[in-house]
Every structure is written in C-alpha cells, then in structure tokens.
Image (tube, helix red, strand yellow):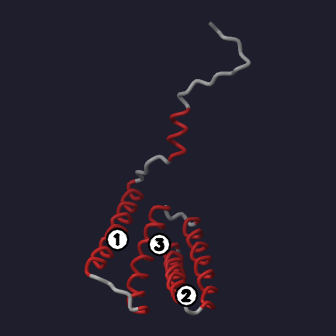
Amino acid sequence: MPWLLLVGAILSEVTASLSLKAALTHPALYVLVVAGYLSSFSLLALVLRRGMPLGVAYGVWGASGVVLTSVLSTLLFAEPLTGLMGLGILLVAAGVMVVEIGSQRAHATGTTAPGPAAALATATSEIPVVDPHQEDPR
C-alpha cells in the first residue's frame, strides 16, 4: 500500500509542476498547482506514516518527479531534451534503484545505522553532569 500512495504522491507532484508552467499563460491552473502540491505532500506523509524509510520515499519521490517532469515537459511544452539530459535522467533513475536495493538489503539483514538522536544520546551520556548547587567534593 505505501508504494501505491507513493505513486500517487509522485503523480500529484508532477501534475502540479507541469501545471505551474501552464499557469503562466492560463492563471486558472494555479488552483491545480496548489491542489497538486498539497495532495503530494499529504500522500508522502502517509507513505512515511506507513513505515517507508524517509531516504527511500523521498529519493523515489524526488527522482521520479524529476524524470517524469523532464520527459513530459518535452512532450507537452516542446522543451529540449538533449542526450546529456537523457544521461542525467538515467543516472538519477539508477541512483534511486541503488538506494532502494540498499534499503531492502538493510531491512532484510536488520542492519540499520543508529539515528542522530541515538548518536547524541550516546555521546552525551559520557559527559559528567555538574550540579551548581552541590559543594565541590575536593
């Protein structure tokens, strides 16, 4: 289910981005821009609430949005899509695949790095606490 919600978030974001370009000449489309971005972020929040790691969700959402927006803006607005841009799109897609594969392997083996809060808690647990109201024991 999270993946279906993520697809919805991606399509909403791409629709909003493409509508933003079209709204420059058709201002009524700003309604679609706002609705698209609101629904995209709402769906992305639901994806995260259902347990998908942020790095995976945001990576897939952002990269897919870039790829789809680039390709569709070429088709809809006759914007250029050069070979170098195509290579960049392939690299973005490959990067997202690597992140997803890495996430699946980490999940399967149960190895995850401690988050910043755990690292901070570990680091601060070794700092002595001084009570300014206590007399110096020396």
- Tell me the tag on residue 61: 3
Tell which of 32 and 131 is nearer to you. 32
- Tell me the tag on residue 24: 2
Q: Amino acid at mark 1?
A: Val
Dot in front, 3 or 2: 2
Q: Which comes sooner in the sequence, label 1 or label 3?
A: 3
Q: Residue at x 52, y 79 (%)?
A: 13
Q: Which comes sooner in the sequence, label 2 or label 1?
A: 2
Numbered circles on residues, count: 3
Q: Residue at x 27, y 75 (%)?
A: 87
The CA span between labels 2 and 1 is 28 Å
The CA span between labels 3 and 2 is 25 Å
Query: Tag 1: Cα neighbours inside 10 Å, few (<14), some, or many (≥20)?
Result: some
Q: Residue furthest front?
A: 25
The CA span between labels 1 and 3 is 12 Å
Q: Is residue 120 above or below residue 41?
A: above
Q: Left or right of 114: which side holds 48? A: right
Residue 41 on image: x %, y %? 58, 72
Residue 65 on image: x %, y %? 45, 77
At numbered mark 1, what does the secondary structure look like: helix, strand or loop? helix
Q: Residue at x 44, y 65 (%)?
A: 56
Q: Amino acid at mark 3?
A: Trp
